[in-house]
Image (cartoon, grey):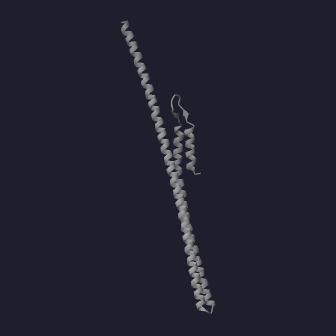
Amino acid sequence: MTNTDILLEDLEDVLEEATAIPLSKKHAVDIEKIKTIIEDIRLNTPQETKQAKAIVDSRNTIIEDAKKEAADIIQKAQEEAREMIARDEITKTAQAEATEIIANANEQGRQIVEEAQNQASEILGNSTTQANEMVTSAQNKSREMLTAVNNYADETLLSIDDALYKALSDVRRIRDGISNVQNKNR
């Protein structure tokens, strides 16, 4: 489980722990906790990108090692062929064996490089897909949380506005009543 996944779970915990507001379907959330978790998600996303880059670098190392191993095999085969020609009285036989060894070494080297490239491509593809999914998931969660916080703030402000309007209407009604009583007493 990545740091981003853990942070997203923390965010869900904060939302689940939200306190219900009486007489409404609204909940109060700790905005500072949510902001801190969102910032941590932003900070962890580059770390996961670094991990994907390390996998790509690892791929390059595998390919280079495979090329080196192939070159070593070819060099050893060539040296072995030269030694056989020098020792053997039948030059044609030695040359044929040397050619076959070199061909086999070239084929082995090609296969090793091809396998290493296939493995590295597969690792890179998997890590890129995983990194993209994590980033997309984090961005979606962040948008959802921001929308929820904005909706909550909007609904809270609307509720306060309604309460203030009602209180102001009550004050005006009382003042009008006092004014009417004073006018009658005159």
Compared to residue 27, the image places residue 79 above or below, namely below
Quadrant in the rendering for residue 105: bottom right
The residue drawn where x is 52% and y is 34% is: 27
Residue reaching furthest to the bottom: 89
The residue drawn where x is 61% and y is 83% is: 80
The quadrant the C terminus occupies is top left
Across and down, in percent, residue 31 comes to: 52, 38
The residue drawn where x is 46% and y is 29% is: 159
The residue drawn where x is 45% and y is 29% is: 160
Across and down, in percent, residue 112 comes to: 57, 72
Compared to residue 147, the image places residue 163 above or below, namely above
Across and down, in percent, residue 109 comes to: 56, 75
The answer to whether residue 42 is seen in the rendering is: no
Quadrant in the rendering for residue 81: bottom right
Across and down, in percent, residue 89 comes to: 62, 93
Compared to residue 173, the image places residue 108 above or below, namely below
The answer to whether residue 145 is seen in the rendering is: yes
The residue nearer to you, when weighing 113 against 182, is 113
